[in-house]
Amino acid sequence: GEDVEQSLFLSVREGDSSVINCTYTDSSSTYLYWYKQEPGAGLQLLTYIFSNMDMKQDQRLTVLLNKKDKHLSLRIADTQTGDSAIYFCAESQHSGNTGKLIFGQGTTLQVKP
Amino acid sequence: DAGVTQSPTHLIKTRGQQVTLRCSPKSGHDTVSWYQQALGQGPQFIFQYYEEEERQRGNFPDRFSGHQFPNYSSELNVNALLLGDSALYLCASSYSADTQYFGPGTRLTVL
């Protein structure tokens, strides 16, 4: 089946760490992605992880992948007000040389000053 | 290097009309995917074009059709518009099945 689930809302204080969680169902997914969407805008690629990795760090962003539990998380260190946005987790399902993304509903991150 | 571009930015149509949305991929990308994002939802995959052919399709009716041109740009056409077609339409480009980069989207309102 195709289903990606995320919690809908997270509120943190500026300077704290944020952790956004996601579960997916397709164990054959090769890549898992995190995208950020600001109001009225398109999706900005934040980071991605290959399915044979456990962790990936990119500046303030840390992605953890638990393949056994099909659980993905995005940690944002030292969260800033500019990080307020909707964050989407997506799994990539490949078929030959094509691939479609299956998205979660998105987690709204509110950062309070 | 220009990213993915889409036109128009906003569009208002009435029920029953037809609409065409356009997308130009990032330089070096040969694959274009289209997604529909309803308000408060995650994007839903419509279809993907590669080598000017529709290679994969999501769960959307035949009213949704597309085209890819030799320069890799793409169009999304929607016929017989319904109120429920109101959404943000996102185009993403990639090199083959690699990482997809999104454009700013076209906001379609059907009255």
Image (cartoon, coloured by chain):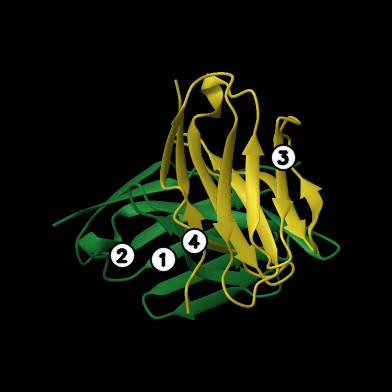
Chain colours: A green, B yellow
Q: Of marks 4 and 3, which one's residue comes earlier in the chain?
A: 4
Identify the residue shown where x is 54% and y is 23%: B84
Q: Which residue is disc 3 drawn over?
A: B65
User: Would you place residue A86 above or below residue A34 in this image?
Assistant: above
Q: In which quadrant is the C terminus of chain A drawn?
A: bottom left
3 vs 2, front mark: 3
Let me know if marks 3 and 2 both belong to one chain. no
User: Is mark 2 in CB contact (under 8 Å) with mark 1?
Assistant: yes
Q: Amino acid at mark 3?
A: Ser
Q: Amino acid at mark 1?
A: Arg
Helix, strand or loop for disc 3: strand
In depth, the one of A23 and A83 nearer the eye is A83
Q: In which quadrant is the N terminus of chain A drawn?
A: top right
Quadrant in the picture for residue A18: bottom left
Q: Which residue is disc 1 drawn over?
A: A75
Percent coordinates x, y for residue B106 in the rendering: 47, 45
Q: Is residue B76 visible?
A: yes
User: Is mark 2 in CB contact (under 8 Å) with mark 4?
Assistant: no
- Which chain does tag 1 point to? A
Q: Which residue is disc 4 drawn over?
A: B5
Q: Which residue is disc 2 drawn over?
A: A17
Residue pushed farthest right? Answer: A96
- Which chain does tag 4 point to? B
- Which chain does tag 2 point to? A
Query: What is the C-alpha distance between the residues marked 4 and 3?
Result: 19 Å
Mark 4 closeness class: few <14, some 14–19, many ≥20 residues within 10 Å: many
Helix, strand or loop for disc 1: strand
User: Would you place residue A86 above or below residue B97 in this image?
Assistant: above
